[in-house]
Amino acid sequence: MADISEKKDVLRIAQAKGIIKLKPETIQRIREKTLGKGDVVTTAQIAGILAAKKTPEIVPLCHPIPITKVDVQITIGDSKVIVESTVQSLAKTGVEMEALVATSVALLTVWDMVKPYEKDEKGQYPDTVIEEIKVVSKIKSPPKRHSEGEKD
């Protein structure tokens, strides 16, 4: 693990995005909330938030940092679900890994919840694919200083 002792705490924000392609019939079930396992969007959002918080337990050399915000947005398209995760911290190191893990786990949660509807007659997933997981933005800026008389 890298030594970050000398670095100063700064505001760090990262956003990651990914896509899962699904059958149109599965997308319709997600919209109608008629899946056997429940509400895909809410479940995937919660899974993504939890994953961001657990990143140092999953990625061996990732520093544990104080996460101040996680937002997981899910958009349902005609043949895909798009997950965008934003993670924020006031820390010595970035939050890209947390955003990537949040996005990845949210996408895996979608897949887990739609498995019965995506399988073909042989039990395979010929149309289901997770792709384009990437960091779409990264911000590193000094924390805002309080004006005199302003309270925390």
Image (cartoon, rainbow, N blue to C red):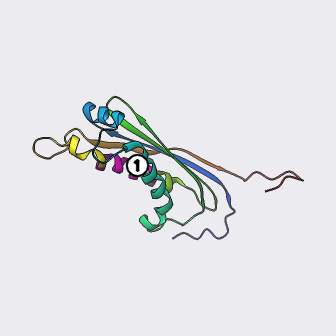
Residue 56: x, y in percent? 48, 65
- Label tally: 1
Q: Residue sitting at 85 percent across and 52 percent down?
A: 150
- Report if residue 103 lies within the magenta region: yes
Q: Quick one: which residue is furthest to the top in this view?
A: 78
- Report if residue 61 lies within the magenta region: no
Residue 107: x, y in percent? 37, 47
Residue at disc 1, secondary structure: helix
Please, is residue 76 above or below residue 135 in the view?
above
Q: Which residue is mark 1?
A: 43
| Magenta stretch bounds | 102-112
| Quarter of the rendering containing residue 2 | bottom right
Q: 63 left or right of 124? A: right
Quarter of the image that includes the C terminus: bottom right
Q: Residue sitting at 49 percent across and 65 percent down?
A: 62
Type of the residue with mark 1:
Thr
Q: 111 left or right of 143? A: left
Give the main secondary structure, helix, strand or loop, of the magenta stretch: helix
Residue 80: x, y in percent? 34, 35
Please, is residue 70 above or below residue 127 in the view?
below
Q: Residue sitting at 57 percent across and 56 percent down?
A: 94
Q: Quick one: which residue is furthest to the right in this view?
A: 149
Q: 60 left or right of 147? A: left
| Quarter of the rendering containing residue 26 | top left
- Taking depth in this image into account, of 48 and 14 the one nearest to the observer is 48
Q: Residues within 10 Å of mark 1 (few under 14, many from 20)?
A: some
Please, is residue 77 above or below residue 64 in the view?
above
